[in-house]
Amino acid sequence: MTIKLTWYGHSTWGIDVAEHRIILDPFFDENPASPVKADQVEADFILVSHGHFDHIADAASIANRTGAQVVANYEIATWLNTQHNVENTLGMNLGGKVDLPFGTVQMTMAHHSSQLPDGSYGGFPSGFRLTIGDQTIYFACDTALFTDMKLYASDVAVLPIGDLFTMGPEDSVAATQLIAPSKVIPTHYNTWPPIEQDVNQWVDQVRASTSAEPVVFKAGESIEI
Ligand code: NI
Ligand code: MN
């Protein structure tokens, strides 16, 4: 099965599987790295990893315009429904799996925080592990390094490298060793000065210390994986 990934800068991803369009952590309008605005985005499903602004900012507007189903933890799904009139939500929680038309989505652990933009409790932060055809893709989302990542062994890993708010380049190389993917993709970096990273140095470290192929996207770029 062909899976097309598109990076919209920061931590926002498009995942196209056949006719299904999935957006992970929609942050477009105030994302300085995004080449498109939220009203240009089409989606059938929106996955939200946690409550922080840079992951949820445009979830409600895109969902309410397109009718996309928002998949998030129970607290965030409820907040989107009651505070932003999003009707089509699917609340889940850590460790749970759900079969959707494009594949299976598992909500994975993440070591981070999840307060919503208005100060509401956002439940636990998460990542997502997608099983699409015979491929597994693990989006760690915002998290520190943790050894249980070895439980999320996947063909493709999408890992934060920005440091400060998430794991940085060195820990993402250690995470790559635990997950043992054939491809590893960096995310959550270079959006703003505090999370600037030299991605070429990271590529060299991945090549030197892991058997994964580093795949670096430019913002707006789509690659079939
Ligand atoms: Ni965050
Ligand atoms: Mn973030």
Image (cartoon, rainbow, N blue to C red):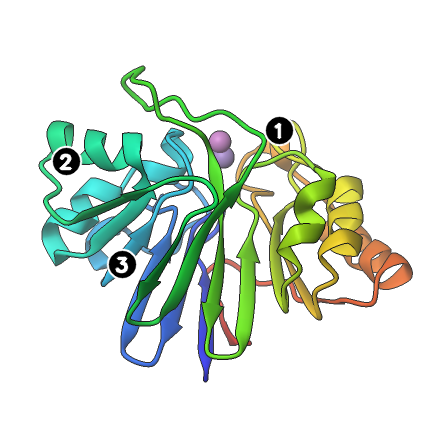
Q: Is residue 43 visible?
A: no
- Number of numbered discs overlaid on the protein picture: 3
Is the residue 50 above or below the residue 59 in the image? Answer: above
Q: Position of residue 103 (x, y in %)?
A: 38, 69
Q: Is residue 156 visible?
A: yes
Q: Tell whether 21 sits left or right of 148.
A: left
Q: Callout 2: helix, strand or loop?
A: helix
Identify the residue position indicated by label 1 in the image. 194
Q: Tell whether 173 sits left or right of 160.
A: right
Identify the residue position indicated by label 3 in the image. 45
Is the residue 33 above or below the residue 203 in the image? Answer: above
Q: Tell whether 198 sits left or right of 18.
A: right
The label on residue 81 is 2
Identified at 9% across, 36% down, the residue is 85
Q: Amino acid at mark 1?
A: Pro
Distance of label 1 from label 2 (alpha carbons): 33 Å
Q: Position of residue 21 (x, y in %)?
A: 30, 68
Distance of label 2 from label 3 (alpha carbons): 15 Å
Q: Amino acid at mark 3?
A: Phe
Q: Amino acid at mark 2?
A: Asn
Identified at 12% across, 29% down, the residue is 82
Q: Tell whether 97 sits left or right of 142.
A: left
Q: Foreground mark, 1 or 3?
A: 3
Distance of label 1 from label 3 (alpha carbons): 31 Å
Is the residue 105 above or below the residue 144 in the image? Answer: below
